[in-house]
Image (tube, rainbow, N blue to C red):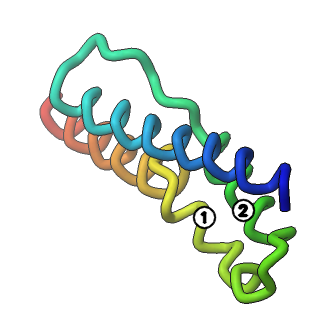
């Protein structure tokens, strides 16, 4: 538990940073790219091996919470589709 909490906090910071970068990139070109899958995979692993058994059942939701996983890829695919239709 002593190691789990700080790693969880760092992982949540990574998830928030991914969301910030995904949204910033939509609003302004030239923003650094997000780190795909890193936060979601770390968060899923942390939830899967959580010391609290109530959290273990929710490990799969991590890929939907992190902006660099399912939401980021969905937004990227949507933007590519819009760009392709404009050309």
Badge 2: residue crowd in 10 Å (few <14, some 14–19, many ≥20): many
Q: Which residue is mark 1?
A: 62
Q: Position of residue 33 (x, y in %)?
A: 45, 22
What residue is shown at x 37% (from left), y 31% (from top)?
21
What residue is shown at x 42% (from left), y 55% (from top)?
71
Quarter of the image where one finds residue 19 = top left
What residue is shown at x 70% (from left), y 73% (from top)?
59
Looking at the image, which is closer to me, 55 or 4?
4
For the residue labelled by badge 2, is the local secondary structure a helix, a strand or a loop? helix
The answer to which of marks 1 and 2 sits earlier in the sequence is 2
For the residue labelled by badge 1, is the local secondary structure a helix, a strand or a loop? helix
Q: Which residue is mark 2?
A: 44
Q: Are marks 1 and 2 in contact (CB under 8 Å)?
A: yes
- In this picture, is 5 found above or below 56? above
Residue furthest front as drawn = 2
Quadrant where the C terminus is found in the figure: top left
- In this picture, is 32 found above or below 20? above
Residue 20 horizontal side relative to residue 39, left or right:
left
């Amino acid at each position: 538990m002593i190691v789990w909490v700080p790693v969880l906090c760092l992982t949540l910071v990574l998830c928030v940073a991914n969301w910030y970068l995904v949204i910033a990139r939509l609003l302004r070109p030239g923003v650094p790219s997000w780190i795909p899958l890193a936060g979601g995979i770390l968060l899923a692993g942390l939830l899967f091996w959580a010391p609290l058994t109530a959290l273990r059942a929710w490990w799969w939701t991590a890929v939907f919470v992190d902006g660099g996983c399912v939401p980021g890829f969905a937004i990227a695919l949507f933007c590519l589709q819009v760009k392709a239709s404009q050309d």
